[in-house]
Image: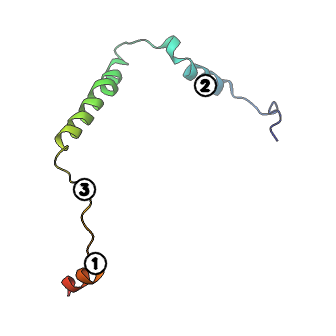
Amino acid sequence: MGGHHDNLLKDPAIEEWIWMRQNTNRYFKINRRTAPALLMMGLAIPAATFYFAISTQDKVNLKPEAKKAWAQAYAKNE
C-alpha cells in the first residue's frame, strides 16, 4: 500500500522552494519590503476586527424569537 516513491521525478526549484518555506525563520529579516505586511497583518487587521466587534456588540439580536404556529402565520398572510 504505502511503498517507496523513489521513481518520481523531483523538480529542484520546487524542492528548494519547499525547503525555504519550511525554514523561513532562519532567513526572515524585517526591512522596508516586509515591514508593511507585518504592520498590516499584525496591527491593522486585528484592530479593524476589534473595532467591528466592539461597534456591533449590542446592535445585533441573536436571541431566537418564539415560533408561531403554522395556522397563525398562514391566517395573517391572507
Residue receiving disc 2? 18
Q: Nearer the viewer, residue 75 or 27?
A: 75
Q: Nearer the viewer, mark 3 or mark 2?
A: 3
- Residue 65 point in image, percent of width and height: 24, 64
Given residues 40 and 58, the one toward you in this image is: 58
SS class, disc 2: helix
Q: Locate residue 14 relative to residue 59 in the image: left or right.
A: right
**First along the sequence among labels 3 and 2:** 2
Amino acid of disc 2: Ile
Q: Amino acid at mark 3?
A: Lys
Q: Quadrant of the N terminus?
A: top right
Which quadrant is home to the C terminus? bottom left
**Mark 2 Cα-neighbour bin, 10 Å: few <14, some 14–19, many ≥20:** few
Pointers 2 and 1 in contact (C-beta within 8 Å): no
Q: Which mark is residue 69?
A: 1
Q: Quadrant of residue 31?
A: top left
